Each structure stands twice: as C-alpha cells, then as structure tokens.
Image (tube, grey):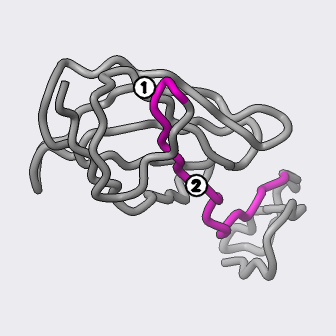
Amino acid sequence: TATLSGDGKHELNAKATDAAGNVGSTRNFEVTLDTVTPTLTLNITDMDGKVLQPGASTGDTNLVFSGIGEPGLRALVFDRVDSETRTLLSEVVISEDGTWSTTVTLSGDGNYQFYAFSYDAAFNALETGDVEITVDT
C-alpha cells in the first residue's frame, strides 16, 4: 500500500517477498496523481458579435460558443434537452493559450439550454452552468 501526497509525478517501486523471505526483483514505475478539476468557461455570441446572456433571445440559428479552459483538453458543447437527454453540438480542443471557440448551426427555433463540459486524463470533470437561450427566427 502506498499513500501519495500532493498532485504531480511520483516514483514508486514494488517488490515481492515469499513466505521464506526471498525477495524478488524490484520494479520501479512512475505514476501521476491529478486531483485538480480543469477550468472551463462558456460564452455565447450571435453572428453579429452580440453576447447572449442567460435568458436572452436571438433570431440567429448560428451561434459562436467560446471560453477559457485547460490547454490540450477538449471542450464539449451540449444542449440539455431535458433532465435525462443531452445533445452534443460540438467538440473542440482547447488551444495552447487556453482559449477555445466553435460555431454551431442550430436546427431551428426553440428554447435551448447550453452548457460546456471538459475532463482531463484523470477523468476530473467540470460542467459549466446552463445558459438558456431562445431562438426565434
């Protein structure tokens, strides 16, 4: 049993000892402990550059989703249809400077509940809050 303290790389070694006390060869390996949830923000604008705040209405079915996140991870944009159903609208890799952006064409008029989601290699996940937007063309 090993207890790791602090995020980061840790060197571990393992060896087996039999009932007679004979020690087998030692094996060294490295593990990375990551308990930090990635950062992620979500901004929504229409094609004219107007920022859409929660509860906003727009006549545009083409929307730009953008934000800040952890470089190299993916930002996934969803529409929360109801408490059990989500539709993936787009997936984009967060750039080296920590920014991400993607344009989505919606299927038509309606009320949408958008959110973004990201996770790292250790499956630490972050979901932004919902942003409800009404599209009425």
* Residue topped by disc 1: 90
From the viewer's side, name the closer residue of 73 and 94. Answer: 94
Membership of 122 in magenta stretch: no
Which mark sits nearer the N-terminus, 2 or 1? Answer: 2
* Residue topped by disc 2: 41
In the rendered structure, are the residues bearing label 2 and label 1 in contact, judged by CB atoms less than 8 Å apart?
no
Task: Give the magenta part as a residue range.
Answer: 30-48
Amino acid type shown at disc 2: Thr
Residue 13: give x, y in percent of width and height.
Answer: 85, 62
From the viewer's side, name the closer residue of 131 and 122. Answer: 131
Residue 54: give x, y in percent of width and height.
Answer: 35, 58
Eyeballing the image, is 14 above or below 63? below
Q: Residues within 10 Å of mark 2 (few under 14, many from 20)?
A: many
Eyeballing the image, is 71 above or below 18? above
Q: Gap in Å between the C-alphas at discs 2 and 1?
A: 15 Å
> Element under label 2?
loop
Which residue sits at x=19%, y=18%? Answer: 107
Amino acid type shown at disc 1: Ser
Which residue sits at x=78%, y=56%? Answer: 31
Q: Residues within 10 Å of mark 1 (few under 14, many from 20)?
A: some
Eyeballing the image, is 54 above or below 80? below
Which residue sits at x=79%, y=70%? Answer: 7
The quarter holding residue 23 reads bottom right
Quadrant the N terminus occupies? bottom right
Which residue sits at x=19%, y=24%? Answer: 137
The quarter holding residue 112 reads top left
Membership of 46 in magenta stretch: yes
